[in-house]
Image: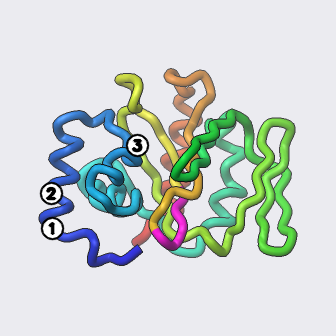
Amino acid sequence: MDASLLTDELTESIRGYFADDSSRMTMMAARKFAVPEQAVVDALVGHWPVVRLRPGVFRELVESLPKLGLMRVFVRSRAAVIESVGEFGGFSETGPFFNVQTDTLDMHIMHAEIGPIYSVRKVGHDSDFITHSFQFFDHQGDAAFKAFLWEDYPKVPPHRVEAFEELTARFAEV
């Protein structure tokens, strides 16, 4: 994503948009402001509990996700969204693909296409509950996939939230 897209004026506009309603979807904000979704998430860093993770942590982070238990994974294109609930595991690498294959998740991720990754805590778009997610973007700033804590949602067990926060701290961009 071109960093010059996110001017001070645009950053303030995006923050104002969410100040009016913190449950708004970052995907819809990206469409409203005609920017990649990553620009929306970047605008919220330092304003909300959104943390950009260090470059190059993709594999180590994904291989750490099993400790977060059940997760809801969103993958979308401009035309459709698929949501799947399951646990991460069964990792392997074949050619350009980093694979996640369990009884509940089957993902083939072209990991070289993964760019910035964020830890995001925000109000869900359909509730008053705080969501906890790791959001993976491609190099163009579009969402590749998002993985949300989902065990007993919306009352995610405290030990899962603590594990999420520990991973965020461990992989945070310095």
Hey, what amino acid is under mark 3? Arg
Tell me the tag on residue 121.
3
Q: Quadrant of the N terminus?
A: bottom left
Residue placed under numbered mark 1 in the picture: 8
Outermost residue, front direction?
79
In this view, 151 is above or below 136: above
Which residue sits at x=19%, y=70%? 7
Hey, what amino acid is under mark 2? Glu
The range drawn in magenta is: 136-140
Q: How many marks?
A: 3
Left or right side of 166 for 96:
right
| Residue 122 occupies quadrant | top left
Query: Answer yes or no: do the residues labelled 2 and 1 have beta carbons within 8 Å?
Result: yes
Q: Residues within 10 Å of mark 2 (few under 14, many from 20)?
A: some
16 or 168, which is in the foreground?
16
Query: Answer yes or no: do the residues labelled 1 and 3 have beta carbons within 8 Å?
Result: no
Left or right side of 31 for 14:
left
Tell me the tag on residue 12.
2
Answer with mark 1 or mark 3, whichever residue precedes in sequence.
1
